[in-house]
């Protein structure tokens, strides 16, 4: 069962490390659907997407790390 927690921790780290490219992909995908927007709004969209991916990766990493530590106790 610890293997699952270790994989979850690795996934969390990967999401944190790839937050910037994922945020950029999200922004470009949104831009292709909408068709165009102001530069400042586009920058804020990408920035919020990056922060969201970092938070999601951090939560996954934190939960799997705590579970990994407390599994034997």
Image (tube, rainbow, N blue to C red):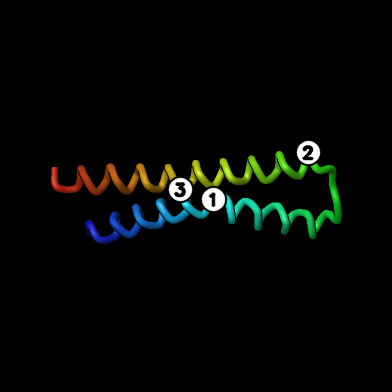
Question: In front: mark 3 or mark 2?
Answer: 2
Secondary structure under tag 1 reads helix
Residue at 35% across / 44% down in the picture? Answer: 63
Residue at 65% across / 53% down in the picture? Answer: 24
Labelled disc at residue 70: none
Residue at 37% across / 47% down in the picture? Answer: 61
Secondary structure under tag 3 reads helix
Residue at far left of view: 73
For disc 1, the neighbor class at 10 Å (few under 14, some 14 to 19, many from 20) is many
> Which residue is disc 2 drawn over?
40
Mark before the other along the chain sequence, 3 or 1:
1
Labelled disc at residue 19: 1
x and y, in percent, of residue 4 in the image: 29, 59
x and y, in percent, of residue 35 in the image: 86, 56
Residue at 29% across / 54% down in the picture? Answer: 5
Mark before the other along the chain sequence, 2 or 1:
1
Q: Nearer the viewer, residue 1 or 44?
A: 44
For disc 3, the neighbor class at 10 Å (few under 14, some 14 to 19, many from 20) is many
Is 35 positioned to the left or the right of 19 in the image?
Answer: right
The CA span between labels 3 and 2 is 26 Å
The CA span between labels 2 and 1 is 20 Å
> Which residue is disc 3 drawn over?
57
Q: Nearer the viewer, residue 16 or 59?
A: 16
x and y, in percent, of residue 65 in the image: 29, 46
Is 22 positioned to the left or the right of 15 in the image?
Answer: right
Mark before the other along the chain sequence, 3 or 2:
2
């Amino acid at each position: 069962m610890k293997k699952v927690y270790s994989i979850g921790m690795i996934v969390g780290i990967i999401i944190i490390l790839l937050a910037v490219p994922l945020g950029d992909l999200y922004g470009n995908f949104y831009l292709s659907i909408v068709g165009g927007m102001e530069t400042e709004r586009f920058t804020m969209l990408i920035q919020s997407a990056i922060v969201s991916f970092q938070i999601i990766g951090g939560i996954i990493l934190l939960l799997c790390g705590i579970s990994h530590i407390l599994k034997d106790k």
